[in-house]
Amino acid sequence: MSSAVAAARVGVLSRPGPAVAAIAVLALVLSCIGLANRGLGLDELLSANFAAHGPWATLVTVLRFGVHPPLYYLQLSLWMLVGQGDGWLMANSMLWHAAAVMLLAHAAGRLYGPRIGLAAALLLAVSPAALLYADQVRMYTFVMFLAVWAWYAQARWIEGTSGRLGAFWMILAQVAVTASHTAGLLMLSGIVVFGGIGVLATRRRYLILRWLLAEGVVLVLSLPAIGIGMLRGVSHLRTPCLQDIVAVWKFLAGGGGFVQFAPQFALLAGPLLGAVVLLALLAGMLRDRRLVLPILTLVFVPLLLAALASHLAKPLWIERIFVPVIPFLCLCLARAALGGALSRQAGRATVLALVLLWGGITVAGQTARAKGDGYQPAADAVRLAARPGDLVLVDGDFAYWCFLWSLAGPDWGDPRQAYILNADWDRLMRKLPEPMLGLLDLGEDSRRLRALGVSVALWDRREAPPTATGDILLLRPQSTTAIALPDRRLGETQVFAPLLLERWTAQP
């Protein structure tokens, strides 16, 4: 190696800032590939509706309707004070993804050296699993950043380099995770177990007691989030079988990206890549005993606890709650390759091979990936098809908001004044004193309005549909049961998966 090349490499490692910035830019560029072909899905449209009217309205709306705690939505509401377009909303998540890449580079570099920090960040920047959620207007990249912060704050506190406010920052980072997602405690589980074993290994009684006290404070401050998770039901969670566990591991290892651009190879290539990544971790543990604890705790404990809790208590299993595991998988792979178990040349070749493989899957997958439900296409079809006197009926309260956002944007109204199909909420509304209703600015009036010249109404299936002088355009999920409208016949049906748009005309 020439002296000039060696000096350049030493310079990169001693001043990694430009390299970290370049990796963060790479993460942003990859997240933007194919972006023009993507829209917002149901959950993302709900996020937009929750956060569109400022922080106070967001807090009230999320506590009224949300299945997750409000922290993510509150920061999104601040972001939306600048703009409310689809691209601007997705940019929020993209920047949190890039921020997580930069924080991982800094944290891993401080703890394990700049070579490992840069390698871990590069792997996260090209990870197909991370990029799959980088443009989602949901809390997952935000929580991924918070999880890296929680891990780093705890590690510095344990080693005694965090300063006088170290315990405060450790508690704050962990509570921020639980205040952003109902499964926040599960997302933190690997970090907490990793820290707990590390603290016990010190055999310092005072440190152990302080750590227990700090985690007790986190638990107490997380009780409101736990309460939200217990009170709000979510239908898409499941109890995992072996096939579900394999599917999640394939997703984390990047194999899920094959489905986007090469579905014919996904059955073979996805599990193969998952097996390769798993074998790389196992080989790292066998070669370097220092990797056993972080791999078992940071990567596998959340999966194990989610599976156990799903079988013993209530279903919790869904792919996206494991997004915060991705940075730690990248970190452990970087440590396995560059931490001394392999020769320097072999370690670099291993990281480079995985970066190229993941990067290729990401580019191909991002190019082919489509995102968004049928709300925007349905709104576009209504604009073209609706005639004077026609009425658009929307089946479902959340679907009503999402369709109106797609039709008219945030100007359609505020969910706090929207009618919802919930008898328990009706009873609560009647019990609230008038001053409280005024303070919260709650109402139940918005069941029918006009948006861009189109009359739109929320339909309660328990009631007769409203009358219309023209046709009725019924927008309903494909999963709902078909129902005939009285004195009308079904004409054209358009499919905007997962929605159906039916035109019902008056009987001749």
Image (cartoon, helix red, strand yellow):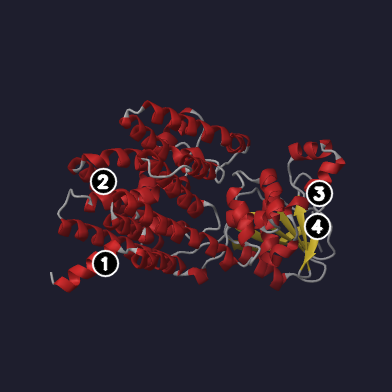
Q: Which mark is residue 11?
A: 1
> Nearer the viewer's eye, disc 1 or disc 3?
1
Q: Which mark is residue 443?
A: 3
Spatial CA distance of label 3 from label 4 is 14 Å
> Nearer the viewer's eye, disc 3 or disc 4?
3
Badge 3: residue crowd in 10 Å (few <14, some 14–19, many ≥20): some
Q: Residue furthest front?
A: 164
> Nearer the viewer's eye, disc 1 or disc 4?
1
Q: Which of the two discs, 3 and 4, labels the residue nearer the N terminus? A: 3
Residue type at the position of mark 1: Gly
Residue 120 lies left or right of residue 410; in this view the side is: left
Disc 2 marks which residue?
281
x, y percentage for residue 166? 45, 42
Spatial CA distance of label 2 from label 3 is 54 Å
Query: Marks 3 and 1: in contact by CB < 8 Å?
Result: no
Spatial CA distance of label 1 from label 4 is 64 Å
> Nearer the viewer's eye, disc 4 or disc 2?
2
Residue at position x 57%, y 41% in the image: 235
Indicate whether 446 appears above or below 32.
above
x, y percentage for residue 329? 34, 49
Indicate whether 360 appears above or below 162.
below
Disc 4 marks which residue?
448
Q: Which of the two discs, 1 and 3, labels the residue nearer the N terminus? A: 1
Residue type at the position of mark 2: Leu
Q: Which of the two discs, 2 and 1, labels the residue nearer the N terminus? A: 1
Spatial CA distance of label 4 from label 2 is 57 Å
Spatial CA distance of label 2 from label 1 is 30 Å
